[in-house]
Image (tube, helix red, strand yellow):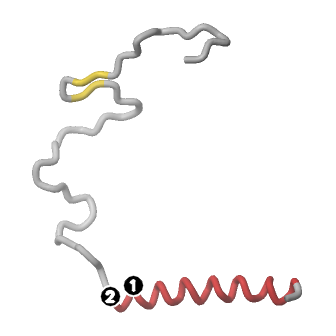
Amino acid sequence: MNTAVRVTAFPAALAATFGAAYGVGAGVGPVGERGGGHGGRAEGTPKGPAAGGLQVAEGGYALEPETSRIAAGRVS
């Protein structure tokens, strides 16, 4: 198989694959939709603001390192 055939066959196969996936998705429709839509919360989910950045404590549990420094050249 020469290069020109490969360069043409790959995008054609890729387009056929995504086209088939789109066709199946359009035919099947949404799967497992509960009616809440985007942004809805499941029951039992806390309604407070989500923590931003690195969260180190929640619900009485905290991440605390055993040591604050590790010596250079030492396997930890």
Under circle 2, the secondary element is: helix
The numbered mark at residue 28 is 2
- Marks 1/2 in contact by CB < 8 Å: the verdict is yes
Residue appearing at x 18%, y 66% in the figure = 36
Residue 73 drawn above or below residue 15: above
Q: Residues within 10 Å of mark 1 (few under 14, many from 20)?
A: few
Q: Residues within 10 Å of mark 2 (few under 14, many from 20)?
A: few
Corner quadrant of residue 41:
bottom left
Left or right: residue 34 versus residue 54 is left
The numbered mark at residue 41 is none
Residue under circle 1?
25
Corner quadrant of residue 66:
top left
Left or right: residue 23 versus residue 1 is left
Q: Quadrant of the C terminus?
A: top right
- Residue 12 is situated, as x and y percent measured from the top left of the image, at 68, 89
Left or right: residue 63 versus residue 9 is left
- Residue 48 is situated, as x and y percent measured from the top left of the image, at 19, 39
Single out the residue that lies furthest toward the front. 75
Between 70 and 8, which is closer to the camera in this rendering? 70
Residue 26 drawn above or below residue 33: below
User: Which amino acid, mark 1?
Assistant: Gly
- Residue 57 is situated, as x and y percent measured from the top left of the image, at 28, 25
Under circle 1, the secondary element is: helix
User: Which amino acid, mark 2?
Assistant: Val
- The residues tagged by marks 1 and 2 sit, at their Cα atoms, a distance apart of 5 Å
- Residue 62 is situated, as x and y percent measured from the top left of the image, at 29, 22
Residue appearing at x 65%, y 87% in the figure = 13
Q: Quadrant of the N terminus?
A: bottom right
Corner quadrant of residue 24:
bottom left
Residue appearing at x 22%, y 73% in the figure = 33
Residue 32 drawn above or below residue 22: above
